[in-house]
Every structure is written in C-alpha cells, then in structure tokens.
Amino acid sequence: MEAPRIIQLPRILDKRGNLSFIEECSHIPFKIERTYWIYDVPGGESRGGHAYRNTDEFIVALSGSFDVVLDNGIEKKTYTLNRSYYGLYVPKGIWREMTDFSTNSLALLLASTPYEASDYIRDYNDFILSR
C-alpha cells in the first residue's frame, strides 16, 4: 500500500492569474472515477470520519484552509491544506477526518471509484477491527 503524502501540482504563473491542474495517473497515482467538493462547512464542524475499503482519494483546498487528520490504526498525522497547487493523497484503508475549515473554504476531492455506500467504514471500532 502506498503511504499518504502531499503532492505538489504543476503551477503556471502569470500576472493575469495563476493556473494549476491535475492529470490522472500522472500527477496522482490513480484514475479519477468521481469528483466532489465540500463547502459551506459551519465553524466547528468536521467532515469525513470514515475510511474506504477500496477508494484512494486526492484532496485539494481550492480556497481557504482546513486540516485533514489521517489515522492508520496505529498513529495519527495532521496535514494542513491551504494552497490550491498541492493536495493530499489518501490511500484506501486510512481513517480520515477533515477539521478546522476556514470561512468560505472549498475542498475538492478526487476519488478512484464511483460512489458505493458499502465501500465506507463509518464506525471507528469496525475500522480498528479490520486492521
């Protein structure tokens, strides 16, 4: 299994405004099957709180900032995302929670599988038992 990691994306700097992009199987280590975004998160709320059995994800803060807390069942590590030209690769089998959203933050998530409710492990005790 690959390890979670920050991946820097290409940046094209221009005085008219900068541009970054993501290409599947090039910048991120999987084919993109689903794209979704999280926004308007009220202060103090968190998102996620689950693991995937089969899905890899790549998370980018397109606007604002937030933390992603990853837990492999042994240790936890927090990543702060606050630039639109890098993101966090999260392989399957890692518990994740997104916290500390700034006002007007926008999280883009790219997933390696289509949505399937049975792919989610939503109970932390079940996650630990599945390790």
Image (cartoon, grey):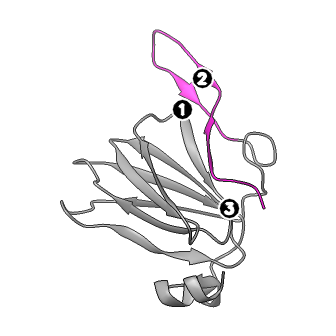
Callout 2 amino acid = Arg
Q: What residue is pinned by disc 3?
A: 91
| Residue 123 seen anywhere in this rendered image of the structure | no
Q: What residue is pinned by disc 1?
A: 85
Give coordinates of residue 78: x percent, y percent.
44, 51
Q: From mark 1 to mark 2, how far is it between C-alphas? A: 7 Å
Callout 3 amino acid = Pro
Q: Nearer the viewer, mark 3 or mark 2?
A: 3
Position of 19 with respect to 32 (left or right) is left
User: What stretch of residues is rendered in magenta?
Assistant: 1-22
Q: Is residue 23 above or below residue 20?
A: below
Near mark 2 (Cα within 10 A), the count class, few <14, some 14-19 or many ≥20, is few
Q: Quadrant of the N terminus?
A: bottom right
Q: Nearer the viewer, mark 1 or mark 3?
A: 3
Q: From mark 3 to mark 2, how far is it between C-alphas? A: 24 Å
Q: Which mark is residue 11?
A: 2
Callout 1 amino acid = Tyr
